[in-house]
Image (spheres, rainbow, N blue to C red):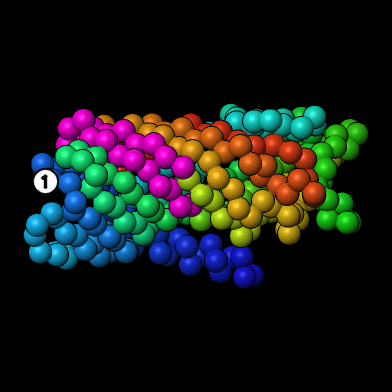
Amino acid sequence: MKSTKKIIAGILLATLGVSTVVADDNNPGGWDFEIPGLRVSKAANSKTTVKYSVSSSFSFGFIGGVSQDPGVGINMGQSFEIEWGDVINGEIRVGRKDFLRLGMGFDWRNYRMTDRMFVKEPDGKILTCDYPAGTEPKFSRIHTFSLSFPLKYYHYFNKKMFFAIGPELYITPWASLKTKYYENGEEKKITAGNIHENTVSLGIGAEINIHHIGIYYKYNPFNVLSSSFGPGFASMTTGIKIAF
């Protein structure tokens, strides 16, 4: 119940809006800070201004497993990420068309495999094993919900095209396990919480955006699950980002 409330609260905050960076010809030294729906900015040698903002960004990508232990086979065609980014952010201009931005967003990830299944043992450890004999696999997945804190360098080629790259910190307070398969034509479902997710991890992300639509790539070398309780596997993601 507490985990559900956290997710609902995150969605409500995210729907209020996030900001986008806008390049202009001002000198370096200006800064911007935004909370949902409200933006405060100050250009170099000028007064502080307050603006109301309703802009946002949405990302969808496919996840591939990296450095996977034997028995783990994350299916990139079925594994995916949904992210609502930069719900709260601050940025500082470091060049005529260059920015540094620190943000906070929400990230949901599904790591799926079909050849084997995730199971939670009575002692809390997460293992992989074959599906029961005579059954038809559907999927087995690890689902995570994270707060993301990207720190990125932005460079604008013009007002409609930019490139960004930088480290991303993830805090993951919640994760779950779900497995589905068919036995004698009947769907069977196994679920589990408290799967000892890796609470803090660090990765790197990059994106290129042209007129509100772009592509992005992320790499996170940290294990999704705690190495003391689960099989090792990290992740990389590639997908589409839309700013509007």
Residue pointed to by mark 1: 26
Q: Is residue 109 above or below residue 206?
A: below
State the extent of the magenta-drawn residues as a range: 148-167
Q: Quadrant of residue 127?
A: top right
Secondary element at tag 1: loop
**Is 161 part of what is drawn in magenta?**
yes
Left or right, 121 with respect to 115, comes to: right
Left or right, 84 with respect to 16, comes to: right
Measured as percent of width and height from the top left, residue 5 is found at: 56, 69
Q: Amino acid at mark 1?
A: Asn
Number of disc labels: 1
- Prevailing secondary structure class for the magenta stretch in the rendered image: strand
**Is 171 part of what is drawn in magenta?**
no
Measured as percent of width and height from the top left, residue 14 is found at: 40, 59
Q: Who's the residue at 53% across and 35% down the image?
A: 219
Measured as percent of width and height from the top left, residue 11 is found at: 45, 61
The residue lying toward the viewer, choosing from 160 and 206, is 206
Q: Is residue 177 visible?
A: no
Q: Is residue 105 above or below residue 25?
A: below
Q: Who's the residue at 47% across and 62% down the image?
A: 10
The 10 Å Cα crowd at callout 1, few under 14, some 14 to 19, many 20 or more, is: some
Measured as percent of width and height from the top left, residue 224 is found at: 66, 44
Q: Is residue 104 visible?
A: yes
Q: Quadrant of residue 67?
A: top right
Left or right, 147 with respect to 134, comes to: left
Q: Quadrant of residue 123?
A: bottom right
Left or right, 184 with respect to 90, comes to: right
The residue lying toward the viewer, choosing from 172 and 55, is 172
Pick the quarter of the image with the N terminus: bottom right
Q: Who's the residue at 80% across and 49% down the image?
A: 228
Q: Who's the residue at 29% across and 61% down the image?
A: 34
